[in-house]
Amino acid sequence: MKTLERQREKMESLGQLAGGVAHELNNMLQPIFFAVDAIQKRAKDDDVIQASSKKIISCTTKAADIIEDILAFAREDSDHLCFINMKETFEHALSFSKDLLPKTIQVSLSPCPKSDYWAWMNETDMVRLLTNLLTNAADSMEQKGKIDVKMDYIFVLKDDPNRPEIINDVLKSGRYACVSVADEGRGFPREEIERIFDPFYTTKEIGEGTGLGLSIVHNILKNWKGGVNVSSVEGKGTVFSLYIPVCRTET
Amino acid sequence: MARILILDDVMDILETMSFLLIAEGHGVRIETQAQDALRSLHATRYDLIITDALMPHMNGLEFLNALREHGILIPVIAMSGGATDSYNEHILGALRDTATYFLRKPIHPSSLCEAVTQALEGEKL
């Protein structure tokens, strides 16, 4: 319990730090964009200057994208939340996110329950959640294989001994949508599970990932008053379960 | 040609942005402090203000309110490198609603030129 509390405090202060760093870095990137533009305009006939300028712009743009990820992680209150239909939002976000995967990855969606529930969230972040999880799953399977995705509604009773620690510690009693993303990839070593939601945690090669994806997932769910649980067996695969509070209220 | 006042606490941004706007044919004055910018605005007529959002002493929202209180009703382009906490997030939200344009740093030069042109055309209408 105390470990999780400390973990949350650590994440919050890291969030503030990351927000501050991102703000400063954007201020540093800005003059680069403007100065390169001035150089490009003054040396229109110089191929080397034009090619070098394009390189500077593309690297600066990549740096700006990484900072955008850092800000998404740091943001306490992202886009406006509203009551939206859970099933529709999930299905729509999934169809968008899975289009970003290579054709060698098969995404299999179990039929969603018919019952209608509403959640206090936003679709942009739902897309971000699923994109992060699907991309990670595809990476861990070296871009080939099957990802099983499921959405169900469950009732969480606080302190239910059959539920994982996260459920008892983070979620209140009530009804939740449980979205699970299961892959058959390399999985995480047991000793690393606690660290995977830490900012900048990555198993990818340098330059291939920022290590912010899962901390963004954690923060989005925290913002929605939900939670995320992970179970993983090294060499067999990983299942991420997202818990999103839902109710029967309509718009 | 328009007369543009730029306010930002980062001198490198002021200098490079003024290179860009001068090359576009505009007259530019740069200020690092909101109070100095207000004094300049009283002394000279400007067509457009470009201001940072999060600055020490007076933030972009307070600056915008001070402009309105002083009866300065020219278009304003606000810009920011992102919020560092929920209070600043609130300031950025309010600026998005009140400024003529709101741009996220780093701003691409062509996006700035476009916003400047549109803000100035809006003023002429």
Image (cartoon, coloured by chain):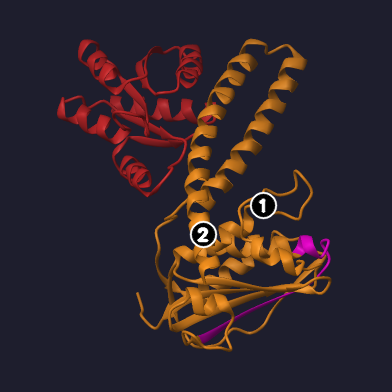
Label 2 is placed on what type of residue? Answer: Thr
Identify the chain drawn in orange.
A
Depth check: give the residue in front, B33 or A88.
B33
Magenta-tinted stretch: A138-154
Q: Chain of mark 2?
A: A
Depth check: give the residue in front, A175 or A199.
A199
Label 1 is placed on what type of residue? Answer: Gly
Residue found 63% across the figure and 85% down from its top? A111
Name the secondary structure under disc 2.
Answer: helix
How far across and down, in percent of the image, does residue A15 sit?
Answer: 50, 50
- State whether residue B46 appears in this view: yes
Reply yes or no: does residue A155 show up in magenta. no
- State whether residue A102 appears in this view: no
Residue found 75% across the figure and 48% down from its top? A208
Q: Which residue is mark 1?
A: A211
Q: Are marks 1 and 2 on the same chain?
A: yes
Depth check: give the residue in front, B114 or A225.
A225
Name the secondary structure under disc 1.
Answer: loop
Q: Is residue B77 left or right of residue A74?
A: left
Residue found 63% across the figure and 76% down from its top? A180
Q: Is residue B121 left or right of residue B103?
A: left
Q: On residue B61, which mark appears?
A: none
Q: On residue A124, which mark appears?
A: 2
Q: Quadrant of residue B97?
A: top left
Q: Quadrant of residue A60?
A: top right
Which of the two discs, 1 and 2, labels the residue nearer the N terminus?
2
